[in-house]
Amino acid sequence: MSSTFDARKTKALAMGGPEKLARRKAAGVLNARERVEKLLDPGSFIESGLFGASLADPDKSAADGKIAGFGRIDGRECAVVANDFTVMGASSAGTNGRKIGHMKRVATSRGLPMVFLGESSGARMPDHMGARGMATLLGNDGTQYIRMRETPWASATLGLSYGSSSWYSVLSDFNVVRKGAVLAVSSAQLASLAIKENVDPEEMGGWQVHAEVTGFADAVAETDEEALELIRTFLSYLPSHHNQAPPERPVPAGSGAQMADIAKLLPEKRTQVYDVRRIVRAIVDEGSFFEVKARFGKVLTTGLARLGGRTVGILANNPLFRGGAMDTDACEKGASFLVLCDSFNIPVVLLVDTPGFSIGIEAERKRAPGKIMNFMQALQLCTVPKLSVILRKTYGQAYLNMGGGRNSDEVAAWPTAEVSFMDPTFAVKIVHGLEPGQPGFDGAFAEMSRDSEPWDAAAVFAVQSIVQPHETRDYLIRMLEVHRQRLSGGIGQHLMRAWPTSF
Amino acid sequence: MAAIQVKAEVAGSVWQITTKVGQTVEAGDTLMIIESMKMEIPVITEHGGTIDKFMVDEKAAISEGQVVAVLSR
């Protein structure tokens, strides 16, 4: 009996066989079991479904191509599904579908983060073909693609990833795409057949497309190992489930050391731009800024960080790109990040310096009003603490979207802040029809400009505090303490838990 | 020698070309500054290389996505 067990176990662990595994190794790509091992704390993996297989071809379907189980990341339990491309292209089929369903159910009901390691050719053929295939293999779980954000989901796209492998990546709260991998609805080959033209896989769904155009890549990795480390880092900021506050970490030495000189990071000349990420890094705990979607909607920087050892979500206008004017990508990025923060009890810090939203024909065609309101609604539905700091410009509707007025629990402004409805030069043109240099322009400009300093906003208590730049870190840590959600044990209402996972 | 096109991210006018043809630049360096929305917005190269040519002159009006310089590496 023992020899049967050993033989079956050895065969299951051998995955798609030595030749396929050797080819991957030669290509510098980890196999599914190596990925699971690298992802999890050493020795913590307990597998579920090792002896799963396709009854149609049990000899060639080790673990039915998807490895599932539980393990620990930084000592915390999580559930994991890793596609094994060496076994039937990790194609989706009956048994492995049940394995994924089990992992998701356990993760959701027991409060464990869920990790998907994506690399799959899509639905298994010919199993899915015909009415019988469709009827028996698809649609058996009416909750399969529901995301209620009970627990965090993280994903890595680590190879050719089609069908449900892609679905789980875009349903996740965080997805890292490894360079060379492809995330798409279906293969380039099938796409070529369908549209009768050659489709390049990377051009269709490579890392650059998802990092810069679709925003489906929250991060990009050079290697499998880096991608797995990024998942571990992402999860370190999050609670295991939505009824828990995020974990706290000791404050690293050197945190706040740059605060004395932070004002130097903001150019004196109001027309000059700067990279707000340098200001973010100076304010938050040393080394804790974890940017997400760095190459998408770059005018708005989003990322997780810690302040005084506690997780915060940072939304910061970045004037380095387009002067910080927010486009539709930035609106989607902002909304999606707010959903993440609110769903997992992460307070939000907004750093504001924006001339407003990008306007014009292109913006309207990209449905700017709808995107601006989605973003705005997300902010108003947030029930986690929101603190905003106006560094420099805040104009028009963008003032509200970035937490102005009662859209934050506390609004602070640096003395350099400018609060107004629009740039005074444009206001003079719109109201008086005057251009710079024309008679009367200077007087009209002075009239429009006079009230944009933050003192009047503070006088009517729309701005609660004017803080010096070097006081910002201490101010935020103190205010986060004040606004701790004591009545609910740090837990928000999660009003956006069923919002789309991409916009 | 791969040619690298550097594009403007935003429409505006070229205020100042801050580099020279033949100059070696690193990823993240500013090649020129565009004036747009009353701001001075740098055109930053994502790749290092040698500047082969500029496709625009100072004061030129440019559109979003326009190639403003070509590098080789």
Image: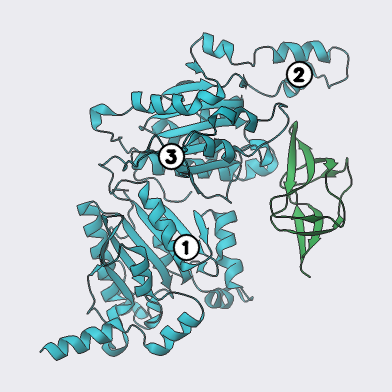
Chain colours: A cyan, B green
Q: Can you say whether A405 is above or below B29 in the image?
A: above
Query: Which residue position holds label 1?
Result: A226
Labels 2 and 3: the sequence-earlier one: 3
B6 with respect to A113 (left or right) = right
Q: Chain of mark 2?
A: A
Can residue A355 be seen at all in this image of the molecule?
Answer: no
Q: What residue is shown at x 43% (from left), y 53% (from top)?
A: A174
User: Residue A8, image x and y in percent?
Assistant: 21, 87
- The amino acid sitting under disc 3 is Ala
Q: What residue is shown at x 60% (from left), y 18% (from top)?
A: A415
Mark 1 element type: helix
Badge 2: how crowded within 10 Å, few (<14), some, or many (20+)? many
A329 with respect to A152 (left or right) = right
Labels 3 and 1: the sequence-earlier one: 1
User: Residue A426, image x and y in percent?
Assistant: 74, 24
Q: Chain of mark 3?
A: A
Q: Quadrant of residue A44?
A: bottom left
User: Residue B61, image x and y in percent?
Assistant: 84, 42
Q: Are marks 2 and 3 in contact (CB under 8 Å)?
A: no
Query: Which residue position holds label 3?
Result: A253
User: Residue A421, image x and y in percent?
Assistant: 63, 21
Residue at the front extreme?
A253
The label shown at residue A428 is: 2
